[in-house]
Amino acid sequence: MPVDLFLLFLSIVAGATLQVGVGVGFSIVVAPIMMVLLGTATAVPVLLMLNTLVSAAAIDTKILSTGRPLIKNAILGCLAGIVLGLLVYPYLSERVVLALTATLLLIGVVSTLAPMKSNISMFKYKAVSGFSGLATVWAATPGPLMMFGLLAVGRPAQEARKLVQPVALVAYGVAFALHGLTNWQTFASATGLPQFALAAIAGSILGRLIGPKLPQNTITNTIRVISVVACVVLFRRAYLIG
């Protein structure tokens, strides 16, 4: 197996572990190497498919009933963002898409560092979910924005990492389906899809084992670090394209 392909498999396992254990991380860990090896046009739908699989494997059925209002509002906001993102996508260059996604993530990071006197309103929560929908179809990296929204409405990090999974499942699934309708051949031409899926499942199992043992602060700070790394990677790729 070529070294670069082996590194991609390792990144998929690590990304799935983070996604399930912390709530975010899959696309941020996997996207850089996958975009280099497969190209952005192919990598985005593959990332969406794998994220859908990982999110499905991460769902805690108990959270579906206890967190239903938050999940429902996040899904509605996310779907609106996905539709808007797809409408705008054809008019934007890849460089602009990557830069805009990185900017959204950077704003999310800064918002968690600024002191808040109270939790954000449900309207603002839906708006954040809408931005995560934009990031979903543009670069398959909505996770941090979803988590920032849940943390901003006062959800503990351990609860937020579970609440984000059903929202991510719907967002990734819809975005993947819409990408498939517009350009299925690009996705189908990718090699190694079954192996990628197995690596994602293996990482998801590890994440389910590790996640409950992580302290609240560890999850929150890990999300911030992952988001900053994602910003740097996206801005750098946008710069190199230009």
Image: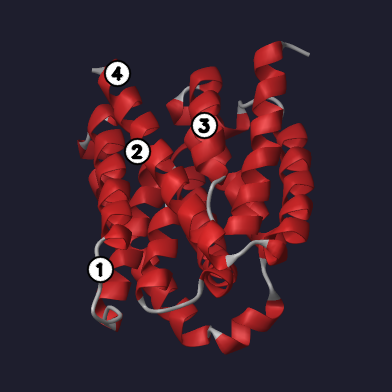
Q: Is residue 176 above or below residue 131?
A: above
Is 17 on the left-hand or right-hand side of 117?
Answer: right
Q: Are marks 4 and 2 in contact (CB under 8 Å)?
A: no
Q: Quadrant of the C terminus?
A: top left
Q: Position of residue 31 (x, y in %)?
A: 51, 33
**What is the CA distance from the residue labelled 2 to the residue labelled 1?**
22 Å
Residue tagged 1: 115
Q: Closer to the camera: disc 3 or disc 4?
A: 4
Q: Are marks 1 and 3 in contact (CB under 8 Å)?
A: no
- Where is residue 200? Give x, y as percent: 71, 44
Where 72 falls versus 207 (above or below)? below
Amino acid carrying mark 3 in the image: Ala
Q: Are marks 2 and 3 in contact (CB under 8 Å)?
A: no
Return the disc, 3 or 4, that comes first in the chain's sequence. 3
Q: Which type of secondary structure does the marked residue at label 4 adopt?
A: helix
Residue 84 quadrant: bottom left
**Numbered tag placed on residue 241 in the rendering:** 4
Q: Residues within 10 Å of mark 4 (few under 14, many from 20)?
A: few
| Quarter of image, res 79 | bottom left
Q: Residues within 10 Å of mark 3 (few under 14, many from 20)?
A: many
Mark whose residue sits in front, 1 or 3: 1
Please tell me whether mark 2 sits on a helix, a strand or a loop: helix
Q: Which residue is mark 3?
A: 43
